[in-house]
């Protein structure tokens, strides 16, 4: 079986860690990216990576569709990430030529459109309707689907052939096979992720205690606004910028403080999979998680993290101080989190199931 993976974005897109980990373990014949999009310019991270001409654009869909066909024509299975227009159009033709088609749903796009795009109105409503139609159509078109969050298929798609693949972590890479690290806890807080929406992050960042230092790993449109606000509030901080997947794991393994997973109670969050949380959990350091649907799935109902109630972000100050004052308790929870992610969210184990699923579709 020859597999082709089709990404809807460049390698710089926020969804990168999911597609990179799946590609690493499935070893496709080819993995296709856009050369450039709003997130930036693609980099050659894999020898089998191919890039579509020029940049992502609705006007270039016919050209890009033909390019994908030519690059993946020798493959038996085409695995598309996200049911977006180009992927949907190309999948239709691939099915006509007898290819197996599988779609991956890492979120429910209409909820993202409704909650993240500014200027709600008729245009946004129409785009949301189109995304809903494409999401359901691609599920019908596909031999099977993979989903990052069980709610997507349970409440929306109801596809018979589906496999739950939440965002995970390469446990060996992040935890070193579970080798015990020195029990060190510094007055530092780290966030790793995109910085596109400053309004969703600043309520948390601005409540970092003055005596703690905030480390931010990532880039995005909201960086300048975040930086101005942190300077105004005199929050000690350091930006580490965008790091490639392998580079990020190396940097986070050096961190000896508290990891922060900040989320708002939104439908998009409830129907997606918070990729940074299993990475944090694998590192064996304390984690603070927003107490909202979606992110809580990673805890498996265990007392393995500290939680912030929605709309009470100011309590981050007290929670961080409490963790530092109760290091033994905090590190015990961190070890439990590490064991949970090893058992349930290791990419190696999940991709083994994914290989079997693809073969049976």
Image: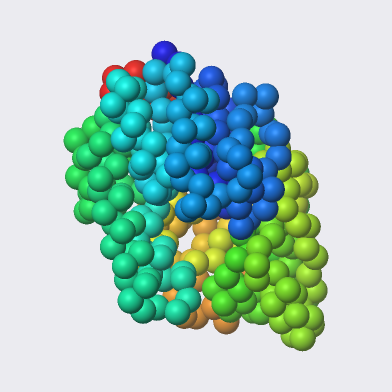
Labels in figure, total: 0
Quadrant where the C terminus lies?
top left
Above or below — where is 241 with respect to 105? below
The quadrant holding residue 287 is bottom right
Provide residue 107's location: percent of width, then percent of height.
40, 53
Residue pictured at 28% horizontal, 62% vertical: 129
Left or right: residue 215 versus residue 339 is right
Left or right: residue 227 versus residue 205 is right
Left or right: residue 84 versus residue 29 is left
The quadrant holding residue 250 is top right
Quadrant where the N terminus lies?
top left
Q: Is residue 150 visible?
A: yes
Provide residue 316's location: percent of width, then percent of height.
59, 75
Residue pictured at 69% horizontal, 75% vertical: 226
Depth check: 78 or 358 in front?
Answer: 78
Provide residue 271's location: percent of width, then percent of height.
36, 56
Left or right: residue 361 versus residue 278 is left
Above or below — where is 291 with respect to 35? below
């Amino acid at each position: 079986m020859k597999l082709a993976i089709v990404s809807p974005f460049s390698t710089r897109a926020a969804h990168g860690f999911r597609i990179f980990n799946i590609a690493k373990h499935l070893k496709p014949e080819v993995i296709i990216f856009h050369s450039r999009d709003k997130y930036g310019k693609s980099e050659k991270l894999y020898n089998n990576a191919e890039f579509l001409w020029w940049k992502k654009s609705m006007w270039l869909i016919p050209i890009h569709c033909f390019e994908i066909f030519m690059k993946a024509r020798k493959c038996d299975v085409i695995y598309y990430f996200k049911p977006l227009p180009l992927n949907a159009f190309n999948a239709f033709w691939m099915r006509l030529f007898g290819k197996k088609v599988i779609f991956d749903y890492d979120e429910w796009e209409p909820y993202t459109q409704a909650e993240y795009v500014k200027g709600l109105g008729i245009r946004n409503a129409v785009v949301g309707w189109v995304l809903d139609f494409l999401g359901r159509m691609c599920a019908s078109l596909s031999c099977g689907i993979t989903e990052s969050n069980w709610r997507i298929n349970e409440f929306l798609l109801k596809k018979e052939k589906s496999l739950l693949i939440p965002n995970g972590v390469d446990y060996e890479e992040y935890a070193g096979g579970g080798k015990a690290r020195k029990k060190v806890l510094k007055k530092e807080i780290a966030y790793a992720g995109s910085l596109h929406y400053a309004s969703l992050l600043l309520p948390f960042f601005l409540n970092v205690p003055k005596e703690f230092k905030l480390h931010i790993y990532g880039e995005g449109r909201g960086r300048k606004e975040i930086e101005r606000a942190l300077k105004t509030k005199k929050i000690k901080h350091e930006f580490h910028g965008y790091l490639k997947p392998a580079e990020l794991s190396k940097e986070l393994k050096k961190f000896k403080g508290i990891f922060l997973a900040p989320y708002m109670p939104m439908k998009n969050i409830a129907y997606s999979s918070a990729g940074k949380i299993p990475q944090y959990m694998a590192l064996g350091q304390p984690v603070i998680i927003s107490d909202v649907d979606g992110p809580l799935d990673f805890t498996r109902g265990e007392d393995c993290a500290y939680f912030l109630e929605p709309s009470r972000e100011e309590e981050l100050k007290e929670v961080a101080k409490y963790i530092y004052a109760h290091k033994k308790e905090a590190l015990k929870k961190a070890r439990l989190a590490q064991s949970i992610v090893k058992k349930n969210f290791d990419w190696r184990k999940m991709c083994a199931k994914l290989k079997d699923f693809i073969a049976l579709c």
